[in-house]
Amino acid sequence: MSKRAYIRAGVLSIEEVFSLITTTSEKAVLFGKNVKISFTSVRFQTLLRSQVCSSCGLEGKFFSVEKHAKGEGQAYHLNMYAVITDGTEVLMTCDHTVARSLGGSDTLDNATTMCTKCNVKKSVVECLKKELILLKERVSQIESRLVVREAQLDSITSCNR
């Protein structure tokens, strides 16, 4: 299973989940569990639009009915998983193409399917980009102050001549 601790009630094929869309409301009983299914959510619509990681091409193979192991009252929900060659399951996620922290919207147009491994790598890159933007802004502020100080120094030295 993935690194996140989930309690799994059962597994559904992609096709079985597609068939639920036309026959089920926002809640369903699957494997004897009440499952919250937000078919209209950006996350779910993104996973339905493409089951393939937009970065590495890993393909989601099934949905799991599960809930977080920690915390009382957690609802069961559907998570999509891919399986790599050694049999390890990799959680598929909905990723913002342009991160919200960088001005991206929380819409289907700005969403893509991504495996957790690629999503984590992308998050690190986005953090570094944000840090670089902040450093460039700081350098710009320092350069502006330097210009002012140089002008003040020129003014003082020209008065002393």
Image (cartoon, helix red, strand yellow):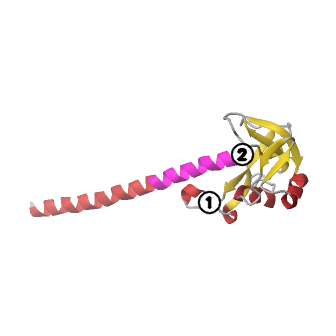
Q: Main secondary structure of the magenta part?
A: helix
Quarter of the figure with the N terminus: top right
- Which residue is painted at 69% across and 66% down in the image? 109
Residue depicted at 84% across the width and 47% down the height: 29
SS at mark 1? loop
* Numbered range of the magenta stretch: 117-134
In the picture of the structure, the residue carrying the numbered disc 2 is 116
- What kind of residue is marked 2? Thr
* Contact check, label 2 and label 1, Cβ < 8 Å: no
Expressed as whole percent of the image width and height from the top left, the position of residue 119 reads 68, 48
Horizontal arrangement in the rendering, residue 132 relative to residue 17 (left or right): left
Image coordinates of residue 47 in percent, x first then y, are 78, 56
Left or right position of 1 against 124: right
Q: Earlier in the sequence, mark 2 or mark 1?
A: 1
Relative horizontal placement of residue 84, taking residue 111 as reference (left or right):
right
Residue 21, picture quadrant? bottom right
Mark 1 residue type: Val
Q: Position of residue 40 (x, y in %)?
A: 74, 60
4 above or below 100? above
Q: Nearer the viewer, residue 71 or 15?
A: 71
In the image shown, does 41 or 84 lie closer to the viewer?
41
Residue 38 or residue 62, whichever sits in front:
38
Residue 98 tag number: 1
Quadrant into which the C terminus falls:
bottom left
Give the distance between the C-alpha atoms of the residues marked 2 and 1, in whole angstroms: 16 Å
